[in-house]
Image: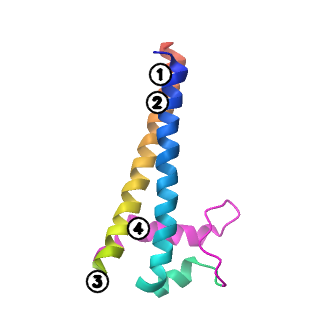
Amino acid sequence: MNGDILIMAVFTVMLVNFARYLSSLRALVVMLRDANPLLYQQICRGDNNFFSLSPQGDISRQKRLYQYIRSQEYLHHHDEVFVGKCNKVRHLFILNAALSGALLATFFLVAFAGL
């Protein structure tokens, strides 16, 4: 197996998972408006300008949502659909982090093992 094909396969899987993660995160932010208005106000800027994942976005707002999901504060929420969406976003984030590590390991494997 050619090393370039292996790298492209892992990279493609990572990109597809990242697109799923962003899509689920956007849906979560929309659900957040009704499920947890206080948190929604903390992470969204107002005037229909949703949470921005760009480098120009406010990092403290992004960090607040990250901490909310990482610490699993949503588990005490009464809406099961919202809790399920938060779990999905959390698992997709973990999966994407693992795939990023796998891609990095694949780079080293191809570079040093000569596949």
Could you tell me residue 44's position as x and y percent?
Answer: 59, 78
Q: Secondary structure at mark 2?
A: helix
Badge 3 density bin: few <14, some 14–19, many ≥20, Cα 10 Å: few
Q: Secondary structure at mark 1?
A: helix
- The residue closer to the viewer here, 48 or 56, is 48
* Label 1, label 4: how far apart the Cα atoms are: 33 Å
Q: Are marks 1 and 4 in contact (CB under 8 Å)?
A: no
Residue furthest to the right: 56
Callout 3 secondary element = loop
Gap between marks 2 and 1 measured at Cα: 6 Å
Tell me which residue sits at (43%, 55%) in the image. Answer: 93
Mark linked to residue 78? 3
Q: Amino acid at mark 2?
A: Ala
| Disc ID at residue 109 | 1
User: Secondary structure beneath disc 4?
Assistant: helix
- Give whichever of discs 1 and 3 has the lower sequence position: 3
Foreground label between 1 and 3: 3
Residue 71 visible here: no
- Per the model, the C-alpha gap separating discs 1 and 3 is 46 Å
Label 2 close to label 1 by CB (< 8 Å)? yes
Q: Badge 4: how crowded within 10 Å, few (<14), some, or many (20+)?
A: some
Q: Where does the magenta region start and end?
A: 47-75
Which amino acid type is marked by label 3? His
